[in-house]
Amino acid sequence: MRYYIGIDLGGTNIAVGITNEYGDIIEKHSKKTNPEKPFEMLVSDIAKTAKETVCKAGLSMSDISAVGLGTPSCINPQTNLLVNANNLNWQNVPLYDELKKHFNVPVFIQNDAACAALGETIKGTASEYDDVVMVTLGTGVGGGIILNKRIFNGCDSMGAEIGHTKLVHNGLPCTCGQNGCFEAYASATALINQAKKAAKSNPESLMTKLCGGDLNEMNAKIPFDAEKQGDITAISVVDQYIDYLAAGISSLIVIFRPQIILLGGGISAEGDHLIEPLRKKLSDVTFSAKQIGIPEIAVATLGNDAGIIGAAMLCRQ
């Protein structure tokens, strides 16, 4: 049996899992990331956490065939440097070279959202499919594209940035420095901003009450909760948000024609309450939907384990 280390590196936690060759997690462990640490020290922490998890699994490093790491950025193929991980305060750092110092087995690094999509395709909701698009609706909009059960992110591994496809020409500013990105309209952050603006203009809205009267306490769940209770303002906010979401996803469907669209991230917890109106809107706005239909729409089910499994299985790519 072969065993692999899968690491899901985020700004809050370092999550490590040991998987077998089938992608089953046999042990996992996490610790705080402490992104304020110097780069080299943080990479050392990652390696230490990985080796501790190997021990917890009752294995030794001689049992490990490869290490995979998912990170919120990508490796520039021209420089071999990690491009930009804002939540770690990393820009153009030699992550691959530094991580390789700690392991005597092959090391693979990939975008964390792509790893999550791969994990869901191997062991999760999309395990019966070969062609999958996953869209994560969290602080930003991320995602991954899987074609023939392999990660697709372009000729230089820097493509498939779903959140930074253009939705509105010269639209709202995005965290990436561009304007009009999908992320600026369909992330949880965007929904919060949309709900705050609507509640400010309509202070009688139930959303204001659910915030305790303080719009700074708005979160992405409140507009959905208020909408379910029939609040007119919230109904409008949620409907507009799903319009934006459908517009972005329809382009992904037209380009890739995947077998399934997976939704992840915090907003996906709305389940069918989100998916049913989204499916209807997609049927209305997607090219040739009336003739050939749209892919299945479903919620990702593995949670944080998806990133671990996907990272561990990078060596199989």
Image (cartoon, helix red, strand yellow):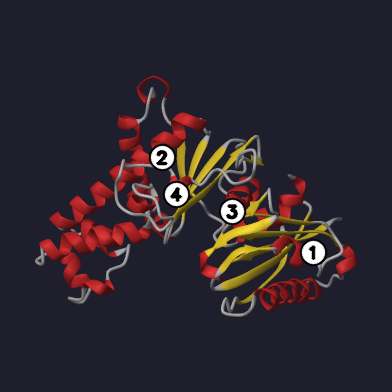
Dot 4: within a 10 Å radius of its alpha carbon, few (fewer than 14), some, or many (20 or more) residues? many
Q: Between marks 4 and 3, how big is the CA–CA gap?
A: 15 Å
Circle 1: residue type? Lys
Secondary structure at badge 2 equals helix
Task: Say what amino acid the circle numbered 3 marks.
Answer: Ala
Viewer-side residue, 155 vs 53: 155
Q: Which residue is mark 4?
A: 163
The residue at which mark 3 appears reads as 116
Rounded to the nearest angstrom, the CA distance separating label 4 from label 1 is: 30 Å
Question: Which secondary structure, mark 4?
Answer: helix
Residue 57, image x, y percentages: 78, 71
Q: Which residue is mark 2?
A: 249
Question: Is residue 250 in view?
Answer: yes
Q: Is disc 4 in contact with disc 3, using a CB cutoff of under 8 Å?
A: no
Distance, label 4 to label 2, CA atoms, is 10 Å
Residue depicted at x 51% and y 32%:
256
x then y, percent, for residue 31: 63, 77
Q: Residues within 10 Å of mark 3 (few under 14, many from 20)?
A: many
Q: Marks 3 and 2, how far apart in space? A: 18 Å
- Res 60 quadrant in image: bottom right
Q: Are marks 1 and 2 in contact (CB under 8 Å)?
A: no
Q: Which residue is painted at 16% across and 65% down in the image? A: 206
**Which image quadrant is residue 14 in?**
bottom right
Q: Look at 32% across and 31% down and name the residue there.
A: 285
| In-image side of 311 versus 304 (left or right) | right
Residues at marks 3 and 1, CA–CA distance in whole angstroms: 22 Å
